[in-house]
Amino acid sequence: MTKTAVILDTEFTTWEGALESNWGEDWQHREIVQFGAVKINTETLEILGTFDKLVKPHINPELTEFFVHLTGITKENVEANGRPFETVYKEFIDFADGDRVYCYGWDGKVIAENCELFNCMQLFHALDFTSLHSYFQLHGVDTSTVNSGALAKYFNVPLEIQEHNAMDDVYSICAGIRHLVDNGNATPFEYYKDKRVS
């Protein structure tokens, strides 16, 4: 087992009711707006590096009030600091540096959708994505109702964050993992070492 891994969360374009309809309208695409990630030591759980980048959505460039309220990411933030998806994703691949990427849910699928949207599907296969859902479900978390940003609160870990901000959600995931390990449980990296779960 390698001694480092990446924990990733993303934020993507959304509209009121889009979650419930699974982004069902033809024009609704889950364009990534933020990558948030940490590189973590799989044995000590020490955070060794961070990756927090904004992406400019191309198909639906106007951020909805719903999205801004949910994430805290404004149009001004994205215009000042956002770059094209392919550019940022290549930087993320470099950050991951071959490590397995752990997500709380469907981020790998959303990245695949973006790679397809922007004709860079070959980049998707550069990384191995694994969902943490079954790990947290093993420890009683209802992953259908507890989002990544709520994990710290679920485990009563004090953490001041903005839920649905990708970087803060990653810190919440890490807090949940740390809580479980401190209470005598295996790390997710041990749990998944012989599994291939996407």
Image (tube, helix red, strand yellow):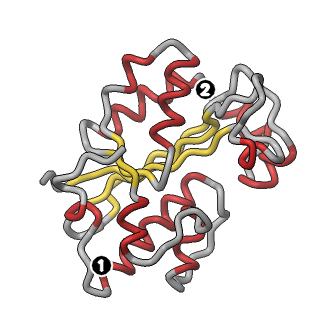
Residue 181's label in the rendered image is 1
Q: Quadrant of residue 90?
A: top left
Q: Residue furthest toward the top?
A: 119
Q: Residue at x 46, y 29 (%)?
A: 89
Quadrant where the N terminus sits is bottom left
| Up-down relation of residue 40 to residue 101 (above or below) | below
Residue 28's label in the rendered image is none
Q: Quadrant of residue 24?
A: top right
Percent x, y of residue 85? 56, 25
Task: Name the residue beneath numbered marker 2.
Answer: 83
Label 1 element class = helix
Question: What amino acid is found at the position of numbered circle 1 in the picture?
Answer: Val
Question: What amino acid is found at the position of numbered circle 2 in the picture?
Answer: Arg
Percent x, y of residue 120? 46, 15
| 187 on left or right of 50 | left
| 168 on left or right of 99 | right
Q: Residue at x 61, y 32 (%)?
A: 55
Percent x, y of residue 171? 49, 64
Q: Residue at x 53, y 64 (%)?
A: 143
Nearer-N-terminus badge (1/2)? 2
Mark nearer the viewer, 1 or 2: 1
Label 2 element class = loop
Quadrant where the C terminus sits is top left
| 146 on left or right of 198 | right
| Up-down relation of residue 12 to residue 112 (above or below) | below
